[in-house]
Image (cartoon, helix red, strand yellow):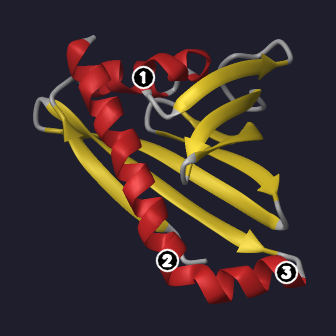
Amino acid sequence: MKPVVVDIVVQAPPEAVWRIVSDIEHGQAMIPAIKSIEILGDRSQGLGTRWRETRMMFGREATETLEITEWRPPREYAVSTDSHGCCYRSVIRVRPQGSGAIIEFEFGGEPYTFVSRAMAFVMGGFMRGSIEKMLRADLAAMKDFCERH
């Protein structure tokens, strides 16, 4: 699956935006689709942080275990998970933009089972549009939260 990449301009300093969007433990307060976050282990930020996240996806609750697999403060981090025959990877990037910042969200997946490859082939276009819509909603929530805090 070719990654979906969306971004949004935020009227807040890049350092403040990074502090907020990299705060996994409190993500539920920022993004309405997230129903719960449970930190697994003793790390709540940085490389190796793992958590169980329940969120609304496509009208249903979905729970996944996620892990920060790349950590480059104060500009980007990557989150990975393995689910339903696919390896998924999300990257959040924060870039300066004038007196504010740009948040970029990249999401992609690689199917590795026959069934997941077939589903990706059949549903690719439909899923891409739905994923982009979900990412844009998350970015709008991040923007609103960053500009209020």
- Amino acid under disc 2: Phe
Q: Is residue 143 left or right of residue 98?
A: right
Give me the residue at 35% from left, 31% from top: 142
Of residue 55 and residue 149, the one placed in the foreground of this image is: 55
Residues tagged 2 and 3 counted as in contact (Cβ below 8 A)? no
Give me the residue at 49% from left, 82% from top: 125
Can residue 94 be seen?
Answer: no
Q: Nearer the viewer, mark 2 or mark 1?
A: 2
Which element type, helix, strand or loop, lies under badge 2?
helix
Of residue 1 and residue 55, the one placed in the foreground of this image is: 55
Marked residue nearer the N-terminal end (2 or 1): 1
Q: Quadrant of residue 67?
A: top right
Q: Is residue 51 left or right of residue 106?
A: right
Q: Quadrant of residue 139?
A: top left
Residue 116 location (% of width, % of height):
79, 76
Disc 3 from disc 1: Cα separation: 34 Å
- Amino acid under disc 1: Met
The residue pinned by badge 1 equals 30
Disc 2 from disc 1: Cα separation: 27 Å
Give the crowd class for mark 3: few <14, some 14-19, many >=20 residues within 10 Å.
few
Residues tagged 2 and 1 counted as in contact (Cβ below 8 A)? no
Q: Can you tell which mark lies on residue 126?
A: 2
Of residue 93 and residue 126, the one placed in the foreground of this image is: 126
